[in-house]
Amino acid sequence: MKKFDTKVQYLKYKVLREVARQAWNDTLLENLLEIPKIIVPGKEPTMRCCVYKERAILGERVKLAMGGNKENPNVIEVIDIACDECPAAGYSVTDSCRGCLAHRCEDACRKGAISFDHQHVAHIDKTKCVECGQCAKVCPYSAIVNRKRPCQIACKVKAITINEDNAAAIDNEKCIACGACVYQCPFGAIMDKSYMLNVVDLLKKSAEGKSTRLYALVAPSISSQFTYAKLGQVVTGLKKLGFHDVIEAALGADMVAKAESAELVEKGFLTSSCCPAFVTYVKTAFPGLAQHISHNLSPMATIAKYIKETMEDAKIIFIGPCTAKKAEVQQERVKPYVDAVLTFEELQALFDSRDIDLTTLEEGVLDNASYFGRIFARSGGLSDAVAEGLKEQKLDDFELNACPCDGIEECKMALQKKSRNLLKANFIEGMACTGGCIGGAGCLTHGEKNKNQVDKYGREAMEKSIEDALSVLL
């Protein structure tokens, strides 16, 4: 029964599960130093050069599972001692160098960073090299290559550099908290902070009658996760954890689709506001277009706001695939409505920390949203929903020219064109993760099959129109 894509995810899960288990039992602080030994019980290392380093790294993972560095506002952090196995990044000369006489690489280098040994083989002086790549372009043997670390390749906003200790460093001014580096790091040296302990505390208080009712607000991409069980069993599992009820964030997506389509007609051009990583990217990289971001809250915040305004003393826990949501709920306009965020990885850890076997449970029901709200989970779904919103509100004389952007690179291209008046589209749907939310860093599984699961889930919706779905709110 495979629950995760990679062994790195599994390791992260084991730490989260053990931290949660200790928290449930009120033994976390007294057993804090024992958790690495529980995960790696023997004297032989399983992943690193020695068991002591392995446990030291696990200790850092435990800290992140408990909320991480409070002085660092970013929800993504680097575990420095775990980040030391990648080769040095930048341009380097490979064994393909033939020691030719032409020395075009030397001529192309304006910084004098190229030198040759007694066999005429080229070498690059890293203290002089500025990574311009001109030497690689002119080498007739393609012997000079640009080695980038997986995290740097994954980060499309260039927020990751290598520090003097040869570890990755994140520029918080550029980082959009999408978590691409988290998922792609082969050593798990970059992780998202977990606020799971806040959720455990709320669940315990609720069970003791000391707290208000907790609502699990689940992202529509949940339909592509927990594939070893049925979605209805996941709903029941959430209630066994102690949640009073489970509500679809897709209902918030229906609300946003209706409001955003009307706003589009009013303003003539919009960029979407549903993906927090995309919104952050627009604000930091294309501030001139920030005024065109839809004023609507994200589906998560929209439905959470409605719940808090209509149900007295409710507490909302959002559960989804997105690390950027952890940053979104720190925003002043969102903070009052969402009390904590869990990823699907963290939810799996919570289930197992309570020994809840989803496959043995009866199926609950989750049927609050329309097809259009549910397909927000994949790229292109929001554009389809806006088109439906225009149609249902009899605004379809407005000609929608949508530009769905699948991944931050497509977002960058569309925003560059729009900023230069080279893009005819009047609605830019931005999804920072490839595939949309189904490609989020907090997913258990990733892949094309997830899109098919979301579409299937959408077709199963009892409410076939946005208005039908929203009628339950009246």
Image (cartoon, helix red, strand yellow):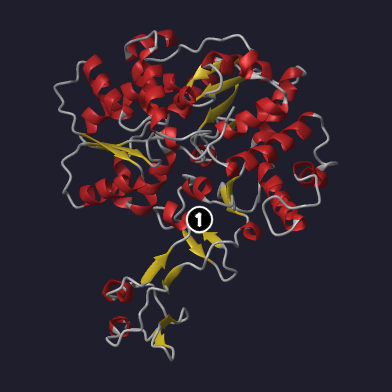
Q: Position of residue 283 (x, y in %)?
A: 37, 48
Where 435 falls versus 106 (above or below)?
above
Q: Position of residue 451 (x, y in %)?
A: 38, 28
Q: Position of residue 180 (x, y in %)?
A: 47, 46
Q: Nearer the viewer, residue 241 or 341?
A: 241
* Element on which disc 1 rests: loop
| Quadrant in the rendering for residue 256 | top left
| Quadrant in the rendering for residue 215 | top right
Q: Does residue 342 show up?
A: no
Tell me which residue sits at (41%, 71%) in the image: 91
- Left or right of residue 182, residue 291 in this image: left
- Left or right of residue 349, residue 174 in this image: left
Tell me which residue sits at (61%, 14%) in the image: 236
Q: Which residue is mark 1?
A: 172
The quadrant of the image that shows the C terminus is top left
Give, as a three-letter code, the residue at label 1.
Asn
The quadrant of the image that shows the N terminus is top right
Tell me which residue sits at (40%, 23%) in the image: 454
